[in-house]
Image: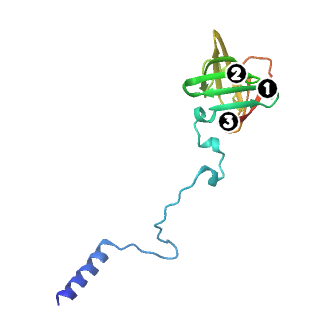
Amino acid sequence: MLKYNILLLLSLTIWGCGAPSTSIDSPATSEIVVESAADSGEPMEDYLAPEDRIMGKWASTDDPNYTIEFLDAGVFKEYTNGKLQNEGTYKYNPTCEGYADKVDKEKSAGCLDVEIGKEKYNYNLLTFTETDLSYALVGGAGKTLSFKIALR
C-alpha cells in the first residue's frame, strides 16, 4: 500500500507542477545553439569593436613598400621598405567629433585622429572592415590611401 501511495504522490506532484509538454507545434528543446559571426552570415566588423578591428599591420594597396601599424595603447607606426619612418599616437573617433561638419557622413565609417610629433591629422575612414582600410585627410585634396591587413 505504501508503494501505491508514493506513486500516487509522485504523479500528483508532477501533474500539479506542470510537467513540460511537447507537441509538434512547440517542441521541447534542451539544446543550446551557439552562433558565431562566421556562421551568421553577418560581416565580422559587426562583432568587433573598432579599436580591435584596426589593430595590426596594414599594407598599402598602392605602394607595396609602405605599411602602417596600429598597436595597443594607441601607438601608430609608419614604415617604408620595412624601416620605421614615423611613430605617434592614434585614436578612433566614431563621430568625427571636432570636425564632423567637414565629413560626408554618408561616406564615413568614423574618423581616425593621428598625432606624429607636433603634427595632428584627422582622417575620414571610407572603408573600415577587418581586412580593408581606406581613408582620406579631412579637408585635404581628396587623395585616398587604401590598405589590406597584413598581420594581426
**Of marks 1 and 3, which one's residue comes earlier in the chain?**
1
Q: Which residue is mark 1?
A: 65
For label 1, the crowd category at 10 Å Cα-Cα, with few meaning under 14, some 14 to 19 and many 20 or more, is few
For label 3, the crowd category at 10 Å Cα-Cα, with few meaning under 14, some 14 to 19 and many 20 or more, is few
Which residue is painted at 67% across and 20% down in the image? 101
Secondary structure beneath dot 1 equals loop
| Label ID, residue 151 | 3
Q: CA distance from mark 2 to mark 3?
A: 14 Å
Q: CA distance from mark 1 to mark 2?
A: 11 Å
Percent across and percent down for residue 70 are: 63, 27
Indicate whether 91 appears above or below 44.
Answer: above
| Label ID, residue 78 | 2
Tag 2: amino acid: Glu
Q: How is the image coloured?
A: rainbow
**Of marks 2 and 3, which one's residue comes earlier in the chain?**
2
- Image quadrant holding the C terminus, namely top right
| Label ID, residue 1 | none
Percent across and percent down for residue 3 are: 20, 87
In the orientation shown, which residue stands out farthest toward the top? 118
Q: CA distance from mark 1 to mark 3?
A: 15 Å
Secondary structure beneath dot 2 equals strand
